[in-house]
Structures are given as C-alpha cells and as structure tokens.
Image (spheres, rainbow, N blue to C red):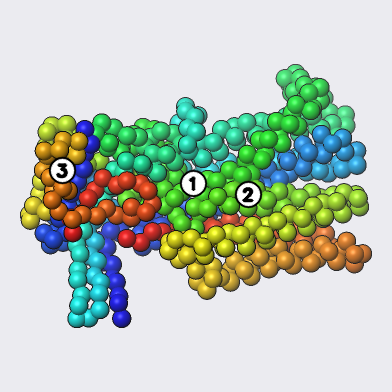
Amino acid sequence: MRYAMIIDTKKCVGCSDCVVACQNENRVPIGYCRDWVIENAKGTFPNVSIELRSERCNHCENSPCVRCCPTGASHYENGGLVMVDRSKCIGCGACVQSCPYNARYSHPDGFVDKCSFCNHRLKEGKNPSCVSVCPTSCMYFGDLDDSESQVSQLLKNRGWKVLAPEVGTKPQVYYLI
Amino acid sequence: MNEEILISGRMNPHIDPTLGIWGWEIPLYLFLGGLAAGILFFAALYSLLGKEKELPTAVRKATFLVPIILMVGLGALFLDLKNKLYFWQLYTTIRIESPMSWGAWILMLITPLSMAWCLSYWRDLIPNWTWQLKFLEWVEVFVQKYRKTFAWTMIISSVILGIYTGILLSAFNARPLWNTSILGPLFLVSGLSTGAATIMWLSKEKLERSLFSKIDLLLIGIEVFFIIHLFMGFMASNAAQIEAAQLFLGGAYTLPFWGGVVLLGLVIPAILEVMELRGKHIPVALPAILILIGGLVFRFIIVDAGQISQYFY
C-alpha cells in the first residue's frame, strides 16, 4: 500500500474549499492551515499562464522531517503516511526546518502539526476531507501499489509533476499538468 | 520581461512570509556550545601533553567557566522547545540519523564531564576546602587518578560537540544555505577560536598568552579559508545555493557578514594579535572580545539567513 494524492491543476479553480474543509475536520487553530492554495502566474504579457495548486504535506517517501526528528515523534505509518506523535513531540523545530515545502507549523499547544492525509478518515474507508469536498473534483486519492487504481491510471495517462523533486524527498502529492 | 508571480494563501505564524521558527535561542546555544567545546579541547589537549604547570589557565582556570557556559546554553535550548515539559523524550531514544539527537546525548555526556574536571581542580581555587558530600571528594580523587582517560574522552566529545553545532544545520537539505558539509568544520574551527580567545584573555602568563595568540591566528587563517571555500562551493552549485549565497554577496546580509564577522571578528583581531606578537602593547581583551562577538554574530547571521534560503518551485 502506498497512498498518494493527485491534484489536477487544469481543473482547480482556487476556491480554497479544501482549506476550509481541513481546518474544520482537523480543528486547525484559527490563523493556521494544514493545506493552502498557491496561484502561480508566469510568462510575458500577453502570453501569460496561471497554475492553481492546492498544497500540503507531501508525505514524502524519503522524508527529511522523519530523519531529523530527535525523538522519533515524526514517523512513517501504514501506506507511507508521515505522521507526528503528539505525545513524543518536544517542539524543537528541527522538522519545520527540514521541510522544503514549509508544510509544518508549530501548534499553539506546543507540538508540531501538519496534514495527516486525514488518517482517521482513511481508517473508516473515506477520502481525506479536502478531496471529498472539492467542488470541481480536481483531487484524487488512492493506492499507487494497485496498478488498477484511479490514481495509478491518472499518472499513467496524464502528464504530471511533483514539487521540488531536486531536494530528493520523493513527494507523494502529484500535480497533473 | 518574463515574470513569475506566486500568491500563497498560507500565513502560518513563524512560517510565513519567511521562516522564523528559530529565534535567538538556537544561535546563542550554537555559540556557547562551540565556546565550551573550544575551552575543553585545549584543556584536555595540554593536559595530555603534560603542560599543566606551564599553561595553568588553559588546563585549569578557563575550564571553570565551562559548566556555566553549558548551563546557559542548555537553558537557551530548553527555552527554544515549544513543548518544554516533554524535553525528556530526547533521552528515551538514540536516533543516529538526527543530529539533534546526537547533540542532546553529547551534552548529557560532556556537561557532567566538565563538572568533574572542575571538581578535580577545585582546591586550586579554594586551597583549604573540605567537601561536605563524600561523593564529591570521591569524584575529585577519581578524576585525578584517571586524568588521562578523562582527557581523551573530553577531547573526543568536545570535537563532536563543536562539529555537531555545524552539522545540526548542514543536515537540513531544505535550506540551501546550510546544506553544505563545510559548515561542520567551519563551526568547529570557529568554536576552537573563541575558546582560544577566552583562554588568552583570562591568562596572566606571558608564555601562555602568546601561545594562544598564535593558535588563534592559525585558527583564524583556517576559518577564512573555510569561508572562501564555502562561497566557492555555493557559486559552483545549483540555483538554490547560488541564490542563497547572494544573500551575502549583495543581499541583506552582505554588510553584517563581511563587515561584522569577517572584518571585525576575524581580520582586525588577527592584525591586533600580530601587532601584539611583534611587541606593540595592545590590551589583550580587545582582540579576545572582538573574536567572541564575531563568533556570536556569525551564528546569528547563519541561522537567520539559512531560514530565509529555500527552494523555489
């Protein structure tokens, strides 16, 4: 089992529903977020293009946060999820420094927090809350080890990218381009 | 003109717009850790070389500062933790891959070691002292008996402590400015240099002063070489590291770094020490203070600038 999230940048409209759904589902403190929308405009006028991306923890296969954590609070779980054990986290900030995506933040209660791919929902057989609320259905979630799964098929048939692959983290959030 | 505009909906405190999760605590600790490592290294080295009589400040006097320096450093580290009451979780596991875990354990070793070293010379400070606790007297005798073993342990652990303060940063591949293996040796040499400066400042013996002045000159030379090496490496690296180096080559940290650290903290004290060695009368405190401040500012700048440097995607 290897969980992956796929986001279709051609279908995303940047409404930020995924952000609100996550804040609600995971009781993210006010003023913080576990996922966010990036609007990336580039080109030379009048030939400009825009890309919209819903970003979050990439649940990297080679996670620098897991490597740098001094207590083992950041760890891998079933399906390659990168999780934080709140009872072991001392809030030293090493994982925050180690993340090239700046996907982690220091929770006001002291521990470090980030996207969990809604692990509690996965256990009930549901999709992460961001995926399930997306009004344009531009987000997909599934198992890459299963070659018949929707996510595997999408990566087979569409062009895609991951963020900052040059850092060597092997991110598991894919963007269709 | 080809332009790229990035608009982010994220505004997490201490993360955006630029990362600032580490404030003054970490750079202060990195400085104090390096300083303690420097003093202990020279104490152990000259104890092993049998120079206890000729170099009393290096082997004995200066080491009395180390437990205090380490306590303040540990205090700063503790303040940096957001989940302070969970700090003991550091000592429930040893994680070889995590430099911070290494650091926590080496501090656990070197702090009591430095205290025991001081205890063994306590009667130098107060000659007619009698211990109220039998245990302390036992420690005193024990260290005196196994001085060589203690010195070797101290030399090795002080080098690990000194080099780890740099490796802690260089292990973060997400921060291009830190992600260079020269940072470990650079921080070690800088720490040894601040240690040598402290010994030189405290010493009353002419021979000891001039010896540590020469050692310091050598270390400053190596440090300058490493700094040049650091930037050569950046300029020959990828876009992210070239951009990180620009922070120091025209960017916001240009003047603080080249003026505050390299000129005031390395070049001027080196010139002062050469003048002193040539017989000019220069108050010894002056180069020593400049080196210490330079070392402190160096760590603040590297920690600050490193958090700004990042990969763009």
Q: Amino acid at mark 2?
A: Pro
Residues at marks 3 and 1 touching, judged by CB atoms closer than 8 Å: no
Q: CA distance from mark 3 to mark 1?
A: 33 Å
* Neighbours of disc 1 within 10 Å: few (<14), some (14-19), many (20+): many
Circles 3 and 1 on the same subunit: no
Q: Is residue A49 above or below residue B27?
A: below
- Left or right: residue B32 versus residue B57 is left
Q: Amino acid at mark 3?
A: Ser
Q: Residue at x 76, y 32 (%)?
A: B151
Residues at marks 1 and 2 touching, judged by CB atoms closer than 8 Å: no
Mark nearest the camera among 2 and 3 is: 3
Residue of label 3: A152
Residue of label 2: B185
Mark number displayed over residue B291: none
Mark nearest the camera among 3 and 1 is: 3
- Left or right: residue B93 versus residue A33 is right
Q: CA distance from mark 2 to mark 3?
A: 46 Å
Instruction: State which quarter of the image contains the N terminus of chain B.
Output: bottom left
> In this orientation, does residue A108 appear?
no
- Left or right: residue B214 versus residue B153 is right
Q: Is residue B273 above or below residue B135?
A: below
* Neighbours of disc 3 within 10 Å: few (<14), some (14-19), many (20+): some
Residue of label 1: B171
- SS assignment at label 3: helix
Q: Amino acid at mark 1?
A: Ala
Instruction: State which quarter of the image contains the C terminus of chain B.
Output: bottom left
Identify the chain of the residue marked 2, using the numbered disc in the image: B
- Left or right: residue B295 versus residue B89 is right
- SS assignment at label 2: helix
Q: Is residue B167 above or below residue A119?
A: below
